[in-house]
Image: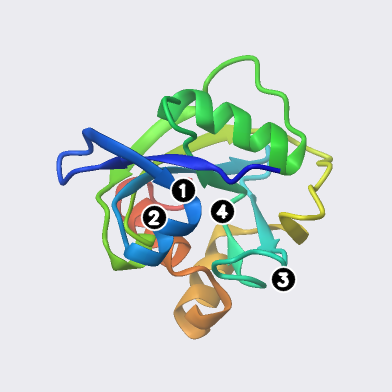
């Protein structure tokens, strides 16, 4: 299988070139990703525990679905693709955009759009991507992140804090 190619971007999130996943990560180049938070009708959020096969944040808890944009792909298309590939959720429309996070150490130098959608599941978890997953009450996630941030991907810790600041627990 050929290695993934990512768009490399500048400080304004403008494409300035392309490079392989390995090089982008090894050199800390700015690139793009999405995170999707899936909530059910009870207000619980679905979180995934990343597979131990992952090259970054293996075994850490993370957003419902997340991933890099392929070269030439836009954020919205990536959000739809990632929820389908990672948790088997087929969306009829783009999830709701919540906010954007600028590239920084906690995001792995990724500019990230954060999305939200609703679904009751059940989900089909991609075994190479996800070890397990579960529904959690937002207050429980907040307490868990506060007490044991090491259990989570660093980007998720940042995203959850920003989500609470902008959207509360709804």
From the viewer's side, name the closer residue of 140 and 3. 3
Task: Point out the tag, 3 or 4, that comes first from the N-terminus.
Answer: 3
Name the residue located 51 percent from the left edge and 68 percent from the top edge: 153
Q: Secondary structure at mark 1?
A: strand
Q: Residue 10's mark?
A: none
- As measured in the structure, the alpha-carbon distance from the residue carrying label 3 to the one carrying label 1 is 21 Å
From the viewer's side, name the closer residue of 121 and 44. 121
- As measured in the structure, the alpha-carbon distance from the residue carrying label 4 to the one carrying label 2 is 22 Å
Q: Are marks 4 and 2 in contact (CB under 8 Å)?
A: no
Q: Position of residue 43 (x, y in %)?
A: 61, 45
How would you rate the neighbour count of disc 1 (Cα within 10 Å): few for under 14, some for 14-19, many for 20 or more?
some
Q: Which residue is under mark 3?
A: 52
- Above or below 142: residue 70: above
Name the residue located 31 percent from the left edge and 47 percent from the top edge: 166
- As measured in the structure, the alpha-carbon distance from the residue carrying label 3 to the one carrying label 4 is 16 Å
Q: Residue 63's mark?
A: 4
- As measured in the structure, the alpha-carbon distance from the residue carrying label 2 to the one carrying label 1 is 6 Å
How would you rate the neighbour count of disc 3 (Cα within 10 Å): few for under 14, some for 14-19, many for 20 or more?
some
Task: Point out the tag, 4 or 1, that comes first from the N-terminus.
Answer: 1
Q: Are marks 2 and 1 in contact (CB under 8 Å)?
A: yes
Q: Which residue is under mark 2?
A: 24
């Amino acid at each position: 299988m050929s290695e993934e190619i990512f768009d490399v971007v500048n400080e304004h999130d403008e494409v300035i070139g392309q490079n392989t996943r390995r090089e982008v990560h090894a050199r800390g180049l700015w690139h793009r990703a999405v995170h999707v938070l899936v909530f059910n009708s009870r207000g619980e959020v679905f979180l995934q525990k990343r597979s131990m096969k992952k090259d970054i944040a293996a075994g850490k808890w993370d957003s419902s679905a997340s991933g890099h944009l392929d070269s030439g792909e836009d954020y919205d298309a990536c959000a739809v693709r990632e929820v389908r590939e990672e948790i088997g959720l087929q969306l009829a429309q783009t999830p709701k955009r919540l906010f954007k996070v600028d590239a920084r150490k906690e995001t792995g130098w990724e500019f990230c759009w954060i999305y939200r959608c609703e679904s009751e599941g059940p989900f089909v978890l991609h075994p190479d991507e996800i070890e397990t997953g579960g529904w959690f009450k937002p207050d429980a996630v907040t307490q868990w992140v506060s007490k044991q941030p090491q259990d989570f991907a660093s980007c998720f810790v940042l995203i959850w804090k920003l989500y609470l600041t902008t959207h509360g627990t709804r």
